[in-house]
Image (cartoon, grey):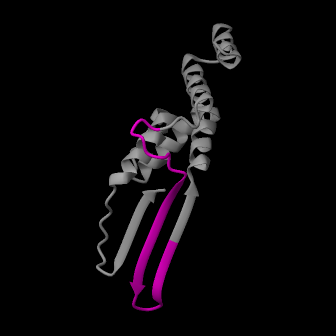
Amino acid sequence: MNEQRRQILQMLAEGKITADEAERLLTAVETVEEPDAAPARGKARPKYLRLIVDANDEHSGETKVNIRVPLKLLRAGMRLAVFVPPQALERANQELVKQGVPIDLTEIKPNQLEDLVDALDDLTLDVDQTDTKVRIYCE
């Protein structure tokens, strides 16, 4: 057992953190320990999330959006999320529900990001405008 895990379990035993907080911290430690593990399917691990929008706008001509987000940034954000106080997550959940987005932020785990990245290989996005093309993928 490494030192970080031992410290987390010690804080739990001393009552300094709750079992839920300990679980979130342990999940974060596990993610940090194996950040660059190769995917099981043999492909190179994606490094970027890409969003491209090509559209012909009647009023202003051609619109192009090309966003490239490093997946390391997303992974780091997932690890840092374990340090958000539970009260803040609950309030964020309430606001999301008010906006019609029924997502429980407390249930999102770092390994789910990897599942999302894997699923993006098969993503198809339909757009209501015939002259607009949207592509989302990992590279």
Residue 16 falls left or right of residue 31: right
Q: Residue furthest top?
A: 13
Quadrant location, the N terminus: top right
Q: Inspect the magenta stretch and tell me whether residue 51 lies in it.
A: yes
User: In the figure, residue 10 lies in which quadrant?
Assistant: top right
Q: Does 35 sit left or right of 97 as displayed?
A: right
| Residue 84 in picture, x, y percent from top left | 62, 36
Residue at position x 39%, y 91% from top? Answer: 58
Q: Position of residue 105 (x, y in %)?
A: 49, 39
Q: Is residue 105 magenta?
A: no
Residue, x 62% and y 32% (percent of image)? 32
Residue 131 lies in quadrant: bottom left
> Magenta segment range?
39-65
Q: x, y (%) of residue 115? A: 41, 40
Residue pushed farthest front?
42
User: Does any portion of residue 66 appear in the rendered image?
Assistant: yes
